Amino acid sequence: MEYAGAVLDLDGTVYRGEELLSGVAETIETFRAADVQPLFFSNNPTKSRAAYVERLSGLGIEAEPDEVLSAGTVTTRFLAAEHGGDSAFLIGDPGLEAQFDDAGVDLVGDATNADVLVVSWTRDFGYGDMLAGYRALDAGATFYGTDPDLVIPTTGGMVPGSGAMINAVGGTMERAPEKILGKPSDEARLAALDALELAPERCFVVGDRLNTDIELGERAGMTTVLVRTGVTTDADLAESDVMPDHVVDSLADVPGVLGIDSA
């Protein structure tokens, strides 16, 4: 197979916390030299595309804004397209709020006046957020989440992610979100394919999570590669219904496994 596009997860695949993982810079150079277009796709919704470009540049990886997607990007686009005339209440990070503002999403401060409730990761999540979410749902708001990640990696270890906060808010009404918009949703899959403008069989996905990265690739019909540099353990893999096409130690092993040669 001659590949032309690579969907690359970020945290746990390209970097871990503030550190670029070994061999990643050289591997991305190999992809580009072999005319394999990288698309960096994170389920972290808090940063804009420009912020991701800046972060990658600081780690020695050059990228353009149109080579970056996130759960925040997908959620923002969805709200602008499907709820352009509706008001929204956000439980989430200021970085996601800024993305909504830039897209013209009508954010309201009173949860009971919201047509839409969006729940995402915020460091300051607490009882007040659960109460506001309950008020919004009780008043009839449509419920969305940005991404399903229950825990996320940090330099200090794993911490609760968006999925935990979505579950906490939904639990007040025993409701699940209408949609969770990050990987592996249909919206995320289409966003990746639209960005690459390639047939899925000419693309591969590399990531460290079975239920997001690998499931996205499986749903899209892409080749899937799980890396061991992130959250998934051998025990997780043995128990999973989602199986990658390849399992490697790190992103640096992908060119050899997939036969990608920069020469």
Image (tube, helix red, strand yellow):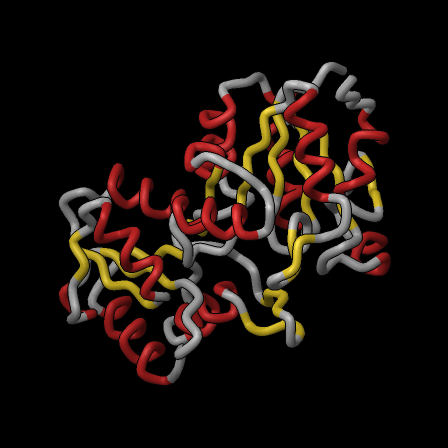
Of 197 and 187, nearer the camera is 197
Question: Which residue shows up at 46% across the image and 41% down it?
Answer: 69
Residue 129 vertical placement versus 5 (above, below): below
Seen in the image, is 53 located left or right of residue 227? Answer: left
Question: Which residue shows up at 49% across the image and 56% down it?
Answer: 44
Number of disc labels: 0
Quarter holding residue 144? bottom left
Residue 19 vertical placement versus 189 (above, below): below
**Relative image position of residue 208 (x, y in whole percent):** 70, 51
Of 143 and 237, nearer the camera is 237
Question: Which residue shows up at 15% across the image and 71% down it?
Answer: 110
Quarter holding residue 117? bottom left
Question: Which residue shows up at 67% across the image and 31% down it?
Answer: 29
Residue situated furthest bottom in the rendering = 127
**Relative image position of residue 212 (x, y in whole percent):** 61, 48
Residue 114 vertical placement versus 169 (above, below): above
Of 242 and 8, nearer the camera is 8
User: In the rendered view of the protein, which quadrant contains the C terminus?
Assistant: top right
Quarter holding residue 154? bottom right
Seen in the image, is 29 located left or right of residue 86? Answer: right
**Relative image position of residue 255 (x, y in whole percent):** 79, 30
User: In the rendered view of the protein, which quadrant contains the N terminus?
Assistant: top right
**Relative image position of residue 21 (x, y in whole percent):** 72, 53
Seen in the image, is 115 located left or right of residue 55? Answer: left
